[in-house]
Image (cartoon, rainbow, N blue to C red):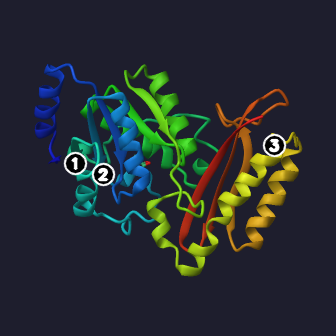
Amino acid sequence: MIVVQTKQELDERLAEWRQHDERIALVPTMGNLHAGHASLVELAREYAEKVVVSIFVNPTQFGEDEDFAEYPRTLEHDTRCLKKSAADLIFAPNIETMYPLGLEDATSILVPRITENFCGASRPGHFNGVTSVVARLFALVQPDMAIFGQKDYQQQLVIRHMSLDLNLPVKIITGETMREDDGLAMSSRNQYLDDDERANAPVLYQVLSGVAEELQRGRQNHEELESKSVKALSDAGFSVEYFSIRRAQNLQIPDRDCDELVVLAAANLGNARLIDNVVVTV
Ligand code: PAF
């Protein structure tokens, strides 16, 4: 496992691989890796001869009152974890490599509309930061494909939008959400849960799955399903940010003919902000 931190070291490795016509897959992460990331690395390996995992806690995607300072930075653990995986290289750049002109003068990419609701509404500027850093990673690594997790459903749609709109030569692949045995979606932020909250946290996935089943059975009153779900989660101690049934393709309100839906939610439990979703074909 090679760990590189500078653009020059990265360029040297990439040039060597490209000389051998090897395809390169990128798995962008903010580190603090878990089995969910490992599954994205395995998926990347199915598409490419070489897999690069980037580890960078990107300041521009955190709001002022968010957890940028506390976000766990665990490069040693991450390196050990990736040694056992199919990754070939860790790219762990510093802030100067990612934002060479400084944060104040950094070019920013804004995807309109699809970024305005859901996580975009509760985290203003968040997707701006995500698309800006992902575009930078694409420019640095120039991967053939990049893998993003389905747990961040809106994020992967926003990145698909950016790539399509800017004609970026990177295939976007979405890897399925990995779950703990009790159904909780794996996330670095799960470690903010105390024991009681952790025991309660799987209720989010249970409610999402329950709604998915109702939809599959032909239930069409989405508003009723949504409000019942918000109540169920609130009763279980969650503070719900959103709970919605939308078109899987673009998060628009679905009409009756839409057969690919996504049920998506964000809810806070103690200090942890949990997001999750289930895609349903009806
Ligand atoms: O999903 C994440 O971990 C981050 O948003 C990403 C895509 C690595 C960009 O910083």
At x 21%, y 51%, the residue is 94
> Where does the image place residue 211, in percent across and percent down from the top left?
77, 51
Task: Name the residue tied to disc 2.
Answer: 56
Tell me: 126 left or right of 18: right
Rounded to the nearest angstrom, the CA distance separating label 1 from label 3 is: 44 Å
Judging by the rendered image, the residue that carries numbered circle 1 is 93
Secondary structure of the residue carrying tag 1 is: loop
Residue sitting nearer the eye, 174 or 7: 174
> For the residue with label 2, is its CB less than 8 Å from the closest atom of ligand 1?
yes
CA separation in Å, label 1 and label 2? 7 Å
* 220 relative position to 263: left or right: right
- Label 2 crowding class (10 Å Cα cut-off): few <14, some 14-19, many 20+? many
Label 3 packing within 10 angstroms: few (<14), some (14-19), many (20+) = many
Q: Name the N-terminal-most of marks 1 and 3.
A: 1
Is disc 1 in contact with disc 2, using a CB cutoff of under 8 Å? yes
What's the residue at 45%, 30% (across, down)? 172
Which residue is under mark 3? 215
Q: Position of residue 171 (x, y in %)?
A: 42, 25
- Does residue 133 appear anywhere in the picture? no
In the image, residue 195 sits, relative to residue 234, either above or below, namely below
The amino acid type, in three-letter code, at marker 2 is Phe
Label 2: element kind? loop
Which amino acid, by three-letter code, is at mark 1? Pro
Asked whether mark 1 and ligand 1 are closer than 8 Å, the reply comes as no
